[in-house]
Amino acid sequence: MTTAMATTWDLSPGVELIIDGKQWRVESCLPHLGRVTLIDDEGAQWKVTLRELIHRPNCRPSTRTRADLPAASRGRQPKTMEDLQPEQRRNVMHRMDHIREVETGFRSGDPLAALPHEPRPQYDPETTTLTQRRHAKAEELRGAAAEDPDGAKECALHQVSFRTLVRWDQSRRKCGPVGLADDRWLREASGHRISPEIREALFAVRPETLRRSKLTSKDHEFLIHQYVRETFGDDVKIPSYDTLKTVWREWFGSSGARQRYARSAAKAQQLTGNHDMKARQALNTAIFLPISPQKPFLRARASSPSFTTPGHRPYARATAMNRAAETLPWGDFFVKRFLAWAVAGISLVALFLISPIVKSADAVEASRPPCATDSFCIYASAGATAPLQSYSSGALPEQSYSTWNEKVNAVVNNTAYWACVYENFGYGGTIQAVQPGNWADLTKLGSDLDGKVSSHKLAKSKAGCFTGYERCPDGNLCIFSDVGGRGEMEKSPDNKASYETLDNRVVSVANYTNRHACFYTAWNYSGTLQVGNKTYSKYVVLRSDSTVIPDPFNKYLSSHMLVFDTDDCAPNLLPAN
């Protein structure tokens, strides 16, 4: 019998099942008779047929005893996409696109929904094996990470090898898309079973440790033993020191923080249900008042339990003794009082200093020019009441302004994309990226783009502002006058004996043809470069590749030839007709 994810159930003795929310353990299974004997935590037996167990709707195998699950899913329900943050879900779907392209040649996994350039030659299932496609994908992701480390890290694709792709594919087949998520994105489960008595002891000892001086893990173990023995007797089995230490860290966090920080964290967790940093900061914000000296407090609180079992120190008396030990001497008291008033004074001064800044920020937001929703607007000045031009988010990018060239001094981005404005035509020159929902007064920014903007586009991320390779159509070889496919562009689907406007100006290349490109430093596929004792005759860009031309060929290319084999890139060899 199988679960929804086609996972085979194991009914060997000792395996746990969850039936109607209750935990049962398999005591014996007789498949030739079709009978299974289950036992619960209290020792009650239940004999059931395999047929009834198979068709019971609220029956599933417990993940605690499933060895086929990763550590992050053991001891709790299997991981799902709902366990991930929105950004992590997007990263999982990015990985899914790459895995589908490796397997089928299409990002969507469906030939009917193919993109214009799909399948790319290195991912065509008709001409390549799965291993070759995996190696090609690993090489592609390594190149993308080297070209744009921040963008690759943002998409969690900065460390992908051939073995990583194999592991992702196996996890995806086993668990679905969530199998591509890193286990580090999920809380690890310990696999420890804590009885109700030990759980009560842990939560009884925790508040007491917050009011004492800093305690070690051995102190925690001693207090847990004391509570259990005085409350439940000697019959309750207590886990080992290592188990108690591990569970304490998982439930309450590390014991390395100062006591006052540990108390604020516990308070925040009590109010919010998790370790919310904003809640902690709000709780840590306090008004410092004068501290009056107090005598040692030796009387136990009425709510503190008093355990008097012979051979053990009373629990409440130990609490009072620790509180008495924490009483400050007079010298420390005056130091603490002075520091409290000093911090209060600094807070007031900071408040007066920040207020003008906040008002200034409000004034800047109030001066924001008007712009329609889901639009990108350009203005002659920040105080303008109407834009020079408004572009919807679905409009084509402006590679060159005709009417408004070098007249833009402010921009408003009311779209869900990053807005990228450029100094030169074709996304060239200086760049200014504007976040979604923000605006920019170019006269006040360090990019010095006021009155110099000549083109713009919208990108899905900030990294997209620094590339323009997407302009190159499929089946063409494109050369650019700036890095990353930016600047002026010349495209050609075939050989080019001489460049028209980019002769000796080529900085980056996109080869989206089905042949390799051989670049030469002179017209008619000829020429050499002499650098020291080395002579260079050609530079090769493989098919489906895009790159920045390195030295010494950067800005020294004048012609190119398209070949099926790189051995055909001999200088002075005319292309075959």
Image: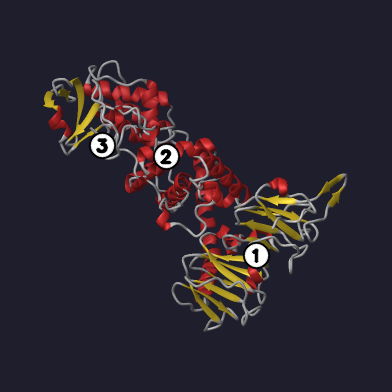
Residue 243 drawn at (x, y percent): 37, 24
Q: Residue furthest front?
A: 577
Per the rendering, the mark at residue 3 is 3
The residue that label 2 is drawn on is 262
**Between disc 2 and disc 3, whose residue precedes?**
3
Q: Secondary structure at mark 3?
A: loop
Which residue is nearer to you in this view: 489 or 384? Answer: 489
The residue that label 1 is drawn on is 491
Q: CA distance from mark 1 to mark 3?
A: 54 Å
- Is residue 186 at least partly visible in the picture? no
Q: Determine contact: label 1, label 3, CB under 8 Å.
A: no
19 lies above or below 364: above
Q: Nearer the viewer, mark 1 or mark 2?
A: 1
**Between disc 1 and disc 2, whose residue precedes?**
2
Per the rendering, the mark at residue 244 is none
Count residues near mark 3 (Cα–Cα under 10 Å), then give few for <14, some for 14-19, many for 20+. Answer: few
